[in-house]
Image (cartoon, helix red, strand yellow):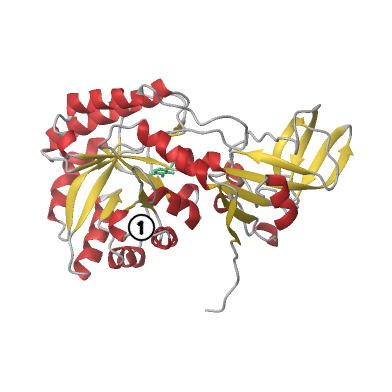
């Protein structure tokens, strides 16, 4: 009994349903699109639910490593069975406390964004009497893709500006406790098409090889980032990347001819592609009203449940599926229960005729769901999250925040 609507009847709404079979399929699909030698980091940011993280770590075939960016994500990765040494720790604001904890837990690979960041990593490593590997995240001056969430090319808290690396390197080499192992690129997220994605990877690989030569910095590890896409809160399929594997092999053979024997080891990263398709958000309709001729469908899942990132200026493409089949649609706004006019999941979108007590399903909500939402805003409980494998319910849980004295 794992039908979304039946699960909602049993566990209440708002409800996220995650299907582990889909996570396994996405993992296989992405690994199949990458050369055999390429490693893949799962960015826990997309969804740190331990059951999903575990599904990316274990099972048949090639499995993921973990890309983490906080003590909380480290804990989620460890809970899911990753070891510290499986993790890449990233982020522009790593604190001493976080670094101490990560190193104590066995993390030995860090992406770094500035000279001071590398020094902080070095201090924490020396305090534990270990040496750790640092990747230099590169903010390249030029980038190739045009459509997507751009992450580089402009002033940024992320990465070393590529043009200052030559001056920075002598300072980095002096830092004890760290070895500069290579580069980390994450130039884009959510690339619109495969050619775009390939163009960006080719650019990245060429640049990495050129920087390595220019700086006389042999690469042991090269993380070329990601950009793999999946529909978000709207129907649609995970894209396939039929050309990617050959294109990556060609670019790597050309620019880094010893990559197949691990010089350097090459990695990619993905969050949304691996988990986005696994999730469905089931929301309950609490009320329907008409205001000045426009219809508002009020649900129990607002931006505290899904797409709180929309509060950061991104418009959600939310589309809803009726509980059953295809029927007539009408224009209405899908809004949440919060006391802010910003609590809109979709403005004047196509909705089936709905009334109080109905449920709606928002597909492809496995990534950037609860933890990317304004969970605490207006004091409503977090949505329940049900994890399903085949026809079995694996777990039912809910994130809880409490005020604690300290
Ligand atoms: C956010 C992020 C990811 C994951 O991005 P997706 O678009 O979800 O694949 C991967 N790597 C880094 C460094 C990130 O910041």
Q: Going by the picture, which residue comes out furthest to the left?
A: 216
Q: Mark 1 points at which residue?
A: 82
Residue 210 quadrant: top left
Q: Position of residue 36 (x, y in %)?
A: 27, 35
Q: Where is residue 114 in the image (x, y as percent from the top left)?
A: 28, 49
Q: Where is residue 77 in the image (x, y as percent from the top left)?
A: 40, 58
Along the viewing direction, whichever of 31 and 197 lies nearer the viewer: 31
Residue 137 quadrant: top left
Say whether residue 389 is left or right of residue 118.
right
Say whether residue 406 is left or right of residue 282.
left
Say whether residue 252 is left or right of residue 397.
left
Residue 117 quadrant: bottom left
Q: Residue at x 31, y 60 (%)?
A: 84
> Is residue 274 in view from this perspective?
yes
In what quadrant does ligand 1 lie? top left
Say whether residue 50 is left or right of residue 283.
left
Q: Which residue is drawn at 48% across and 28% down?
A: 239
Q: Residue at x 22, y 70 (%)?
A: 127
Q: What element carries label 1?
A: loop
Q: Position of residue 315 (x, y in %)?
A: 62, 36
Q: Which residue is drawn at 68% across and 33% down?
A: 319
Q: Going by the picture, which residue comes out furthest to the bottom?
A: 406
Ligand 1 within 8 Å of disc 1? The answer is: no
> Is residue 151 in view from this perspective?
no
- Up-down: is 136 above or below 72? above
- Up-down: is 107 above or below 287? below
């Amino acid at each position: 009994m794992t039908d979304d609507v039946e699960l909602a009847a049993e566990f209440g709404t708002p409800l996220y349903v995650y299907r582990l079979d889909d996570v396994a399929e996405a993992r296989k699909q992405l690994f199949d699109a990458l050369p055999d030698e390429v490693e893949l980091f799962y960015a826990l940011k997309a969804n740190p639910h331990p059951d999903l993280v575990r599904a990316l770590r274990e099972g048949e075939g090639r499995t993921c490593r973990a890309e983490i960016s906080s003590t909380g994500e480290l804990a989620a990765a460890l809970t899911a069975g990753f070891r510290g040494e499986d993790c890449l720790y990233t982020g522009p604001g790593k604190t001493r406390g976080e670094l101490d904890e990560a190193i104590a837990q066995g993390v030995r690979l860090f992406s770094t964004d500035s000279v001071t960041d590398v020094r902080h990593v070095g201090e924490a490593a020396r305090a534990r009497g270990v040496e750790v590997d640092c990747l230099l995240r590169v903010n390249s001056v030029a980038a190739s893709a045009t459509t997507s969430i751009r992450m580089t090319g402009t002033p940024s808290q992320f990465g070393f500006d590529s043009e200052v690396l030559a001056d920075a390197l002598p300072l980095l080499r002096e830092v004890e406790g760290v070895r500069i192992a290579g580069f980390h690129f994450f130039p884009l997220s959510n690339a619109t098409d495969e050619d775009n994605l390939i163009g960006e990877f080719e650019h990245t690989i060429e640049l990495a090889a050129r920087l390595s030569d220019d700086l006389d910095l042999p690469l042991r590890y090269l993380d070329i980032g990601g950009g793999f896409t999946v529909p978000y809160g709207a129907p649609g399929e995970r894209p396939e990347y039929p050309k990617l594997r050959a294109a990556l092999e060609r670019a790597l053979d050309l620019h880094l001819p010893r990559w197949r024997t691990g010089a350097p080891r090459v990695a990619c990263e993905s969050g949304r592609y691996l988990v986005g398709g696994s999730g469905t958000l089931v929301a309950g309709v609490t009320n329907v009203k008409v205001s000045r001729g426009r219809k508002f469908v009020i649900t129990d899942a607002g931006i505290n449940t899904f797409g709180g990132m929309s509060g950061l200026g991104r418009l959600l493409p939310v589309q809803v599926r009726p509980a059953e089949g295809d029927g007539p649609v009408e224009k209405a706004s899908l809004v949440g229960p919060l006391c802010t006019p910003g609590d809109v999941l979709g403005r004047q979108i196509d909705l089936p005729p709905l009334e109080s007590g109905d449920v709606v399903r928002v597909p492809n909500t496995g990534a950037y769901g609860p933890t990317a939402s304004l969970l605490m805003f207006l004091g409503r409980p977090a949505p329940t999250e049900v994890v399903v494998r085949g026809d079995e319910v694996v777990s039912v849980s809910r994130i809880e925040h409490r005020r604690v004295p300290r």
